[in-house]
Image (tube, rainbow, N blue to C red):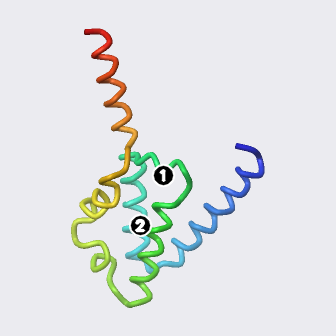
Amino acid sequence: MGIKDMIEGKKEWRAHVARVKALPREYQIVYKEIQKYFFKVGPVELSEGTGLLSGILDLFEEGASLGKGVLEVTGTDVAAFCDDLIKDSKTYADIYQEATKATKKATD
């Protein structure tokens, strides 16, 4: 990754954060919790830009513009909402488990 790519990525992230800050407070709170959840669970595609998070932000902006409460958009179980979004995504935990299994097989 070159310096231009890093600068562009930083600009994109700042624009993304500005969009989050423009959301109603309840949406900001839930968005930040979703973001923390994804960073903890570690879907691999998060390291490839803000695609997943931008999609959630788009959904939240639309919900807010329609006057919906955030839980009307996500449902009352926000963790289940998150899990459903990444159910087909590879996570860093998956990669770790695969590596552990491969190492165990090699040593058996």
| Towards the viewer: 73 or 36 | 73
Left of 56 or right of it: where is 8?
Answer: right
Q: Circle 2 sits on which residue?
A: 31
The image position of residue 54, as x and y in percent, is 50, 66
- Where, by quadrant of the figure, is residue 92 drawn? top left
Q: Residue at x 56, y 55 (%)?
A: 49
Q: Which type of secondary structure does the marked residue at label 2 adopt? A: helix
Q: Position of residue 47 (x, y in %)?
A: 52, 48
* Residue holding disc 1: 46
Q: Is residue 94 above or below residue 47?
A: above
**Tally of numbered discs:** 2
Image quarter where the N terminus lies is top right
Looking at the rendered structure, the secondary structure element under dot 1 is helix
Report the quarter where the C terminus lies: top left
- Nearer to us of marks 2 and 1 is 1
- Give the residue type that dot 2 points to: Tyr
Quick one: 56 or 98, which is closer to the camera? Answer: 98
| Residue at 53 percent of width and 78 percent of height | 22
Q: Is 45 rendered above or below residue 92?
A: below
Q: Residue at x 38, y 43 (%)?
A: 91
**In the rendering, at what x and y percent does residue 2 appear?**
75, 44
Tag 1: amino acid: Leu
